Amino acid sequence: MVVSWQDEVGESYTIHDNSLDGKYLVLPSGELHIRDVGPEDGYKSYQCRTKHRLTGETRLSATKGRLVITEPVGAMKPKISEDSLIKRHASETTGLALLCPAQAYPVPFFR
């Protein structure tokens, strides 16, 4: 399972350190959510740290992920991927996260 994410300068982001109004959010599923992405975020790379459920061994991923950022061209109406329309992740310690992965330009408003 994913226990944290780390950027190239060693800054670590964990599920337990989440601030709902921060730039980085690690979801209970282990996914890294980055808010208000800008051109500067395209220069960073990220690795996940996983923990083996049986042995407790932790490992940093062998490869690094990088964001590919493209500039919007005109307005784009909101769209939601059918594959991830509603995901629910719940556990006794982390609570419940309901995801709404909408994309649009300008950025969509959620209620």
Image (cartoon, rainbow, N blue to C red):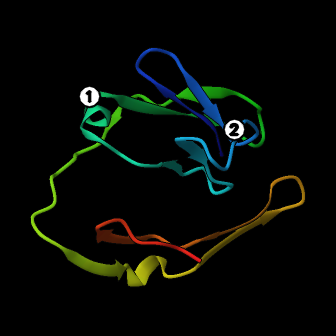
The residue labelled by disc 1 is 43
Gap between marks 1 and 2, in whole Å? 30 Å
Q: Which of the 4 image quarters holds residue 74?
A: bottom left
Q: Position of residue 69 (x, y in %)?
A: 22, 47
At x 22%, y 45%, the residue is 68
Q: Residue furthest right?
A: 92
At x 29%, y 67%, the residue is 106
| Secondary structure beneath label 2 | loop
Q: Residue furthest top?
A: 9
**Which class describes the residues within 10 Å of circle 1: few (<14), some (14-19), or many (20+)?**
few
Identity, as a three-letter code, of the amino acid under mark 2: His
At x 33%, y 80%, the residue is 79
Q: Position of residue 40 (x, y in %)?
A: 28, 31
The residue labelled by disc 2 is 52
Residue 13 lies, with reference to residue 69, above or below; the image says: above
Q: Nearer the viewer, residue 3 or 61?
A: 3
